[in-house]
Image (cartoon, rainbow, N blue to C red):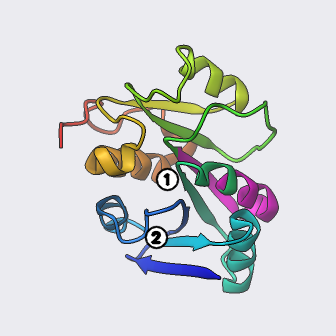
Amino acid sequence: MTSVVEMGAGPPVVALGASFAGSDAHRLLAARFRVIAMETDGDAGAAAAQWVTDAGLEQVGFLGVGAGGTDALAAAVEVGERARCVVLASPGPPPDPQVLRTPKAVLIGTDDPAQPPDAVSAWRAALAPCHVVLIYEGGGDVAAIRPRAFAEAAGDFLDRQGRFGFASKSVAVEPD
């Protein structure tokens, strides 16, 4: 069974991850995007890719929160060039290197115990090329612990993908 909760308007973003739907982070990101939060009992990556195809979406961003990161990557691979970008928030440890041409960003908490000491270089190697954003005091769930910082960083990348490395405003994210 698949549960879908949509909020907002604008460019579509499919979000995969337990307890993201209806959260503060979902609402904040929905101020800029049409955020389609999906939860499923089965293969979430395949379900998301099928949903994108059935909805006729030509360009879509993918967001994977926590364990949903693996599913977001799988969905992006499956939809191919229709995947505009992928953002992973508080994913588990970096996977084996993967080939995915879509622009990618990883948001991790500076005090996330699941991340290795060399997390920035490990993620960049696993998903090269990849932007890594450190969310201070984000713990192991940046979307839940720092929803405004999460929405600002994820939203900026979803807006600008490859131009993300060039700051459009202050690079400091204010405390929540």
- Give the extent of the magenta segment: 72-88
Which residue occupies 70% across, 47% down?
Answer: 102
Specify the farthest residue to the top.
Answer: 117
The quadrant where residue 122 appears = top right
Q: Residues within 10 Å of mark 2 (few under 14, many from 20)?
A: many
Q: Do the residues labelled 2 and 1 touch (CB within 8 Å)?
A: no
Q: Nearer the viewer, residue 31 or 167?
A: 31
The local secondary structure at tag 2 comes to strand
The local secondary structure at tag 1 comes to helix
Instruction: Identify the amino acid type marked 1.
Output: Leu
Mark 2 or 1 closer to N-term? 2
Q: Is residue 55 above or below residue 149?
A: below
Which residue occupies 55% across, 40% down?
Answer: 105
Q: Give residue 130's position: percent from left, percent from top.
A: 62, 33
CA distance for labels 2 and 1:
11 Å
The quadrant where residue 29 appears = bottom left
Q: Give residue 144's position: percent from left, percent from top.
A: 34, 51
Circle 2 residue: 35
- On-image quarter of the C terminus: top left
Which residue occupies 42% across, 67% down?
Answer: 33
Circle 1 residue: 158
Q: Give residue 56's position: percent from left, percent from top.
A: 69, 83
Of the two numbered discs 2 and 1 in the rendering, the one whose residue sits closer to the viewer: 2
Relative to 54, 140 lies left or right: left
Instruction: Identify the amino acid type marked 2.
Output: Val
Q: Is residue 54 above or below residue 108?
A: below
As drawn, the label of residue 84 is: none
